[in-house]
Amino acid sequence: MQADDEPDHTLCPDVAALEVLTRTLVGIAWDSAHAAPPGVTFPQMRLLLVLQTLGRVPCSHLATALGVNASSVTRLADKLEAHGYLSRGTDAHNRSVVTVEVTAAGQRVVDEVLEVRHTAFRTILDQLPEEKRQSVTAAAHDLVRAAAESSVSPVGAL
C-alpha cells in the first residue's frame, strides 16, 4: 500500500500523477465543505454549489447536472429549504414544473465554502514559481476542455 501522495507505479506516469492529484483535490473539496454550517451534509453542499452555478432551474435539470435521480434532489432540497438555503418555485411557462434556486443565505454558505477552498488553492499555488503556476493553469484548462469534449465529461461540481 502506498501513501496518498505517492503515485501508483503500476500505472503509466501521467495517469498515476492525475490519480494523486485527484486525491488531493477531492481532499480539498471535502475539507472546504466542512466550512458549511452544522447540519449541511456533503451531498447538500454539492447541490448548493452546482445550483449556484446553474441559477434557477427545474429540479429535473439539477438532477441531471448532479448525475442523480430526481427523488434524490427532492430529499436534499427539502432539507436545504428547511434551513433557508434554497427556495422552490414554479416555471413561468409550466406551473407543474418545480424550480429551485439558492437563497441569499445559501449563497453566503457557498461563498464561505469556496473561500476556504480558494485559500487552500492559493496556499498550494504560492509554493510554485510563476512559470510553473502558468503551466499548471494552462494544463488545468486543457484537461477540463478535453474532459468536456470526451465521453468522460465530469458530472456536477464538488
Image: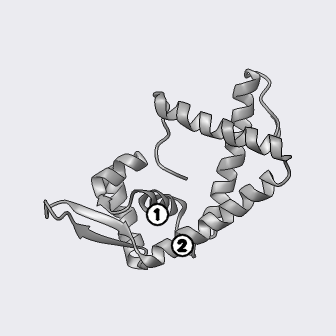
| Observer able to see residue 4 | no
Seen in the picture, residue 59 relative to 69 is either above or below; the reply is below
Q: Which of 30 and 150 is in front in this view?
A: 150
Disc 2, disc 1: CB below 8 Å?
yes
Q: Position of residue 12 (x, y in %)?
A: 73, 20
- Residue at x-position 72% and y-position 55%: 121
Q: Where is residue 61 in the image (x, y as percent from the top left)?
A: 31, 51
Locate the N terminus and report the quarter of the image it occupies. top right
Q: How crowded is mark 1: few (under 14 residues within 10 Å), some or many (20 or more)?
A: many
Q: What element does badge 1 sit on?
A: helix
- Residue at x-position 82% and y-position 36%: 6
Residue 48, labelled with which disc?
A: 1
Seen in the picture, residue 33 relative to 87 is either above or below; the reply is above
Q: Answer with left or right where residue 101 lies relative to residue 41.
A: left
Specify which label sits upstream in the sequence, 2 or 1. Answer: 1
- Residue at x-position 73% and y-position 22%: 11
Residue highlighted by disc 2: 109
